[in-house]
Image (cartoon, grey):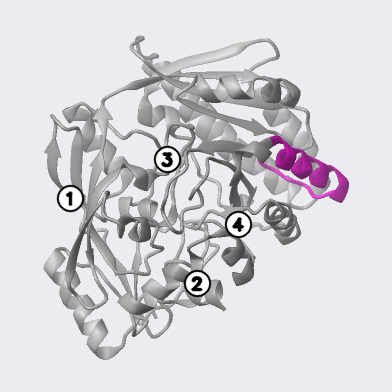
Amino acid sequence: MKILKNWARTSRCTPKDILYPTSEEEIQNIVKICNENHTPIKVVGARHSYNDIFCAGKDGINLSLKHFDAITHIDQQKHTVTVQAGIRIPALIKQLKPNRLSLRNLGTNVFDSIAGACSTGYHGSGIAHGIFVSDVIAMDIITPQGAKKHIKHNDPEFDIYAVGLGMLGVITHITLQCEPYFKLEVTEKRMSLVEIEHDFDTLLADNDHFKFIWIPHTQDFMIWLGNRTQKEESSSFKKWMAYGWTGVVINNFFHEALLFTASFKRALVPSINRLMSKILLPKDGETATSVYPSHWAFFLPHVLKQDVVEYAFKIEETFEVFRELIEMVEKTGIYVDTPIEVRFVKKDTYWLSPTQGEDVCFIGTKIHFPLRRKPEYFRYFSEVDRILLKHSGRPHWGKQFRITTDDFKKNYEKWDDFWEYVEKQDPKGLFQNAFSKRLRR
C-alpha cells in the first residue's frame, strides 16, 4: 500500500498509485487516461500544506512533479524565468543567483514547489507585494481533458486559475517576474503593541517588508523590517550564527527539548516562552541589524513538526483582531508555545485569493509537536477560527481551518462562480477530492 504524508505529518492518504512523470507529454497522457477511466487525480508537490489538499483518495492517482523540475528559459534583460512546475523554491533560487536575479518576495518557508505556492496563495509580507502568484506572467496547464492551455497574467481567466487549489488541471510551466539580485538589510527591534500601533502607517509605508510577532504569555513584541540595500553583506560567521546556531540549534532543537518537557506539564509553556524571548529577541532599547541575500533574509529554519492556522482579514482591523486574540489566550488558559506572526499583503483580483479585493493582514499561529508528542490544541485553533470569522477572515488554503461553506460564500464574492467554472471545465470531477468536497458541502 502506498502512503503519502505531508511534511508535518498532520495529513496522510493512500492513493491507488503515485506517478512521477518527466515530461509534459507524459503528464498529458496520464490525464487523458484518468479522464477515460474516471480515475481521480491530484498533483502532490513538496507537501508543506498542513491539510489534505493534496490527497487523491484510495481510488485515485497522485501525480508528483518532483522529476519535472527544470528551468527552461531565463531572460536576463526582462528579468524573467520560465520553469517546469515541479521545481522547488531552493533549487530555483540556486539557479537564479548566477544569473544575478532574485525572487521578489518570499515567506519564512522557502521549501514549497512553485506550482503549489501559486495554487494555495503562498505569501510573504510587505504591503507593496501581493501573494506569490502575483509575480506570475504566464502559466501552462493541462486541462482535465488532457489539452494544453496557456494563460497569461492579463487574460481574464487568470483571475480564476491564479489560486486554483489544484482543481482545474495540472500546471506544467510557469513564467515568473523576478528582479535584479538584491540584498536586504534586516532590522529587528522590540516595541510594545501600543508603539507598533502608533507607528503602524509609517512602518507599513516606509519599509519594503514589515511584520511583527508577539510571544504569547509575555508582553514581548518584536518588529521585523527588510529593506533593499547596497551595503556590504554580513559575514558568513554572522549568517551561520543567525541561521545555524540560533535558528536551528536554539530555536528548533533546544526549544524542542524544552517543549517535550512541557508536553507532560503544559503549565511550563509561559516560562519557556519567556526564556526563549530573552534568548532570541533583541534586548530592550537595542536594534539588531544584518545584511543578507534576500532569500536568506526571508527564510526562517523550520525543523520542529507543527500544525498551523492562518487567516487574512481587512488591514484596518489589525489591532482590534490582535487584541481579541491576546485576550482569548489570557482568559481561556490555553497554552500557546510559539510566536503569533502578523504580516501584510497587497490586494489582488484572483477569485479564491485570501487577498482578493482588499489589502490584508495575515495572522498566523502554530502549535509544535516536540519529538512527535502532540498536545491538545484543537480548542485553541477553534477559538482562532471563531475570532477571525467574526471579522470575515479568509483562511490560508495550505493551513488548517474548520469553517463552513456558508462562511466561504459570505467572504468570497466569486465563490459560487468559481465552483461553477470548475464543474464546467471538469464535469467528471477528476480533480476533486475530500478537501474540495468539504468546501462545497
State whether residue 17 appears in this view.
Answer: no
Q: Residue furthest right?
A: 331
Q: Which mark is residue 130?
A: 3
Q: Of the residues shown, which amino acid type is indicated by label 3?
A: Gly
Residue placed at 44% from the left, 34% from the top?
299
Which of the two marks, 3 or 1, is nearer to us in this view?
3
Q: CA distance from mark 4 to mark 1?
A: 35 Å
Residue type, mark 2 in image: Phe
> What's under tag 4, amino acid-wise?
Arg
Three-letter code for the amino acid on which mark 1 is drawn: Ala
Q: CA distance from mark 3 to mark 2?
A: 25 Å
- In this view, the mark in front (3 or 4): 3
- What percent of the width, then of the height, locates residue 293? 35, 24
User: Which residue has dot 4 on it?
Assistant: 372
**Residue 132 magenta-drawn?**
no
Residue under label 1 = 70
Look at the image and give the residue range highlighted in magenta: 319-339
Nearest the eye: 16 or 363: 363
Q: Residue at x 58, y 64 (%)?
A: 408
